[in-house]
Amino acid sequence: DTLINQIAAGEVVERPASVVKELVENALDAGARRIDIDLEEGGVRLIRIRDDGGGIPATDLPLAVSRHATSKIASLDDLEGVATLGFRGEALPSIASVSRFALISRHDGSPHGAALEIDGGRVGDVSPRSHPQGTTVEVRDLFFNVPARRKFLKAERTELGHIEEWLRQLALARPDVELRVSHNGKASRRWKGEGDLLSEVRLHEALGEEFANHALRIDHAAAGLRLHGWIAQPVYNRASADQQYLYVNGRAVRDRSVAHAVKQAYADVLFHGRQPAYVLFLELDPRRVDVNVHPAKHEVRFRDARLIHDFVYRTLNDALAETRA
Ligand code: ADP
Ligand code: MG
């Protein structure tokens, strides 16, 4: 039902960057190794995401765009240890209800592709369409039928900036996936697939030469926790918190307690008002963290927050102390 989907869209789809996030996460869930992201007018006019993942069988296209249809939860156990990025089955119907939408896909092993178009929530018929293995989702004229929402979209530059920032955050976590971005018909960014580990190259590309030159490699495990990534030496610090990237089990999150632990680790070497720069990955048993606190999953809740705070503080404080010794 279009109205219900539009209401859900209020939660899922805030702006073009949230559409990019949902669609790229779907592509990653489908096992994509390469994702092409074409944008026009900051994503407001067009967002087209093409992946080389497993694809969707033609007969499943209508299901993929219906509410609460997700192929990603097999049991309640899965809900506990969610390995996939999305699992609510809401993104596609929500986005399709507030745009001119097309889903085109060819499933692994099927000889032909197929397409399904939805115009502001009105679902068309599945028709044959040639497509390489994988999926393309096209979202045109976001909020064309919800003027009250469209009015709140910002200038092209601003919306593009939000998309680029989210992609940077992703590129740091997924160096194994190639990302190509174009804006208004011009190639604007290419993240080459660099292998499993975040390479210095990608770090350098994402955060700049200065960060890369001052980055300390961190990798420490204890008590079932592992913290790895890079922190900048204290001489490289920032007036704003713009280079603070934290990932929990591969997912970018904001967490006050961990952010506080990092700042504490720097407390005696960073003068007042300066901010540390870091890219840190915390890995732990998924049962020790609740990721379903926030619909967009930006926040997490740790079962043993105190222990994690102290582990992060100690690991980083030791690493920083070593550079001074
Ligand atoms: P969720 O990701 O929460 O399952 P979505 O609405 O984002 O819900 O997607 C619905 C379903 O459509 C997914 O469960 C998946 O089966 C299918 N799907 C969406 N995007 C892709 C894609 N890029 N490749 C393969 N399957 C996809
Ligand atoms: Mg999804």
Image (cartoon, helix red, strand yellow):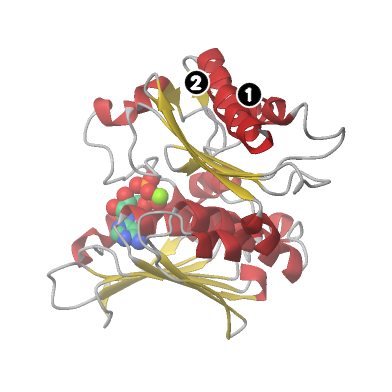
Residue 66 is at least partly visible in this image:
no
- Residue 22's place in the image compared with 226, above or below, is below
Picture coordinates of residue 223 (x, y %)?
A: 39, 18
Give the secondary structure at mark 1: helix
Question: Left or right of 191: which side holds 29?
Answer: left
Q: Which residue is mark 2?
A: 302
Question: Given contact means CB atoms under 8 Å apart, are the residues at marks 2 and 1 in contact?
Answer: yes
- Residue 247's place in the image compared with 117, above or below, is above
**Residue 257, numbered label:** 1
Residue 176 is at least partly visible in this image:
yes
Q: Sequence-wise, which precedes: disc 2 or disc 1?
A: 1
From the viewer's side, name the closer residue of 267 and 66.
267
Picture coordinates of residue 179 (x, y %)?
A: 46, 69
Dot 1 amino acid type: Ser
Question: Left or right of 15: which side holds 269?
Answer: right
Mark 2 nearby-residue class (10 Å; few <14, some 14–19, many ≥20): some
